[in-house]
Amino acid sequence: MQISDYHLTYCTNIHPGESWEATFENLKSYVPKIKDGLSIEKRFAIGLRLSDEASRELLENNELQAFKSWLKANNCYVFTLNGFPYGGFHRQVVKDEVHQPDWTTQARKEYTLRLFDILSVLMPGDMDAGISTSPLSYKHWHSTETARNEIIGKSCTQILEVVDYLYSIKLSRKQILHLDIEPEPDGMIENASGVHEFFEKWLIPQGIPMLTAKYGVSPKEAMDIIKDHVRVCYDVCHFAVAYEDHRTVLENFKKEGIKIGKFQLSAALKMDIPEKISQRRLVEKALLPFVESTYLHQVIGRSEGDGLKAYPDLPDALLALAETHDREWRIHFHVPVFLASYGTLQSTQEDILSVLDLNSQNHYSSQLEVETYTWEVLPEDIHLSLDQSIVRELDWAKIHIK
């Protein structure tokens, strides 16, 4: 939905289902309820998640045109796709497999190009549109610096082929489409410094000679093309888990000409770690309901000297709880954005408010997407019906967009 100069949506990765039939059935079931719950009469935005399977099926048998007609009939529009999870994302063990296939593979590139073909047909004519994607690969799969550099180099080559494709679309159709890389804890790109390094050491040096040779543009124009078509998906939960200062991060991105494709409004868990062991047992008791087998819940601890320690998953952190020198933990667990606390636990809701305020001052992006996909695995006392949950999150976001 449009609110002032912003477009607000929710990500449909909240709905289980990998086929296009299941995806479409979820949209037909939930979108009318959500629109009614929000009392929306204007166009309603959908942040569409398509699996590889669904993307293939949508391009068959005139399904895409049928979906476009359904969007028009129901006064809906699509300006962003979630192209991070390639395959199964619900009711199975996902964990680090969410990064498979990574950006070194043809499968990831072809899936992404297919999504852009779909988005090019669906996107409104009066705005740009983007696809969020994985941070190249999963860091812990690659144990040496040499191996990691090889992964980044291969990924960069693949992404520049996507840039070439998107620039050709801009020239032929006058559409601006962008690939939005989503930094995540334990991704190959996991924070702001990783974004800067990827642009400065990889994308720009490799991309400029490719584009100048093919299109006869200047090096400056080639760099602008890259930064137009590769942007950042700023998932607030991920940057909060990394203890990033949002003002500094966003100012530095702007200084370097790195654009924000969209902000994902999401909240992480956080808590203080008490000194007394007896009190730490209460922390453990509060966190145990959040230990589940579907998703990775990376933890980053901060000590008194601001040193950071990373744990690959919540169970790993809990094993270290009795002896850790950490004074605070932040956990990559997407919790409802409308709740600031859960009993003795808190959320990083304040980070969302900070980012919305900074965006209102500087207009880094007009595209906002609420992304809480963990409803199925949240503790029972936080559950609402799915449509009520989505309505409540969007209502909360609407109130705080300035």
Image (cartoon, rainbow, N blue to C red):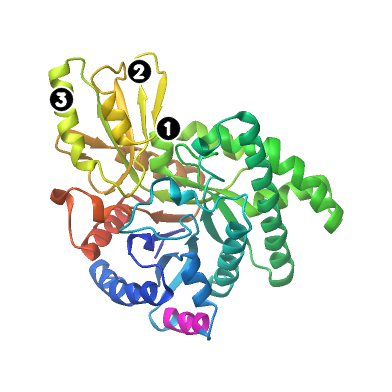
Residue 320 appearing in the image: yes
* 335 or 18, nearer to the observer: 18
- Marks 2 and 3: which is nearer the front? 3
Identify the residue at image location x=82%, y=47%: 209
| Residue at the disc numbered 2 | 303
Q: Which residue is mark 3?
A: 281
Residue 11: x, y in percent? 39, 60
Amino acid carrying mark 2 in the image: Ser
Tell me the CA gap for discs 1 and 3. Answer: 25 Å
Q: Is 51 left or right of 224, judged from the image as shown?
A: left
| Res 387 → quadrant | bottom left
Q: With 284 as the anchor, is 193 left or right in this view?
A: right
Q: Is residue 150 above or below residue 376?
A: above
Query: Can you say whether 385 is above or below 273 in the image?
Result: below
- Whether residues under marks 2 and 3 lie with C-beta atoms below 8 angstroms apart, the answer is no
Helix, strand or loop under label 2: loop
Residue 374 in the image, given as x and y percentages of width and height? 29, 52
User: Looking at the image, which residue is at 31% across and 16% down?
Assistant: 325
Q: Position of residue 68 (x, y in %)?
A: 48, 80
Residue 43: x percent and y percent?
40, 72
Residue drawn at x 33%, y 60% as measured from the top left: 14
Dividing the image into 4 quarters, which one contains the N terminus?
Answer: bottom left
* Residue at point 18%, 23% (across, down): 280
Q: Residues within 10 Å of mark 2 (few under 14, many from 20)?
A: some
- Amino acid type shown at disc 3: Arg
Q: Is residue 160 left or right of residue 127?
A: right
Q: Which kind of residue does numbered mark 1 sit on?
A: Ala
Q: Which residues are magenta?
A: 63-71
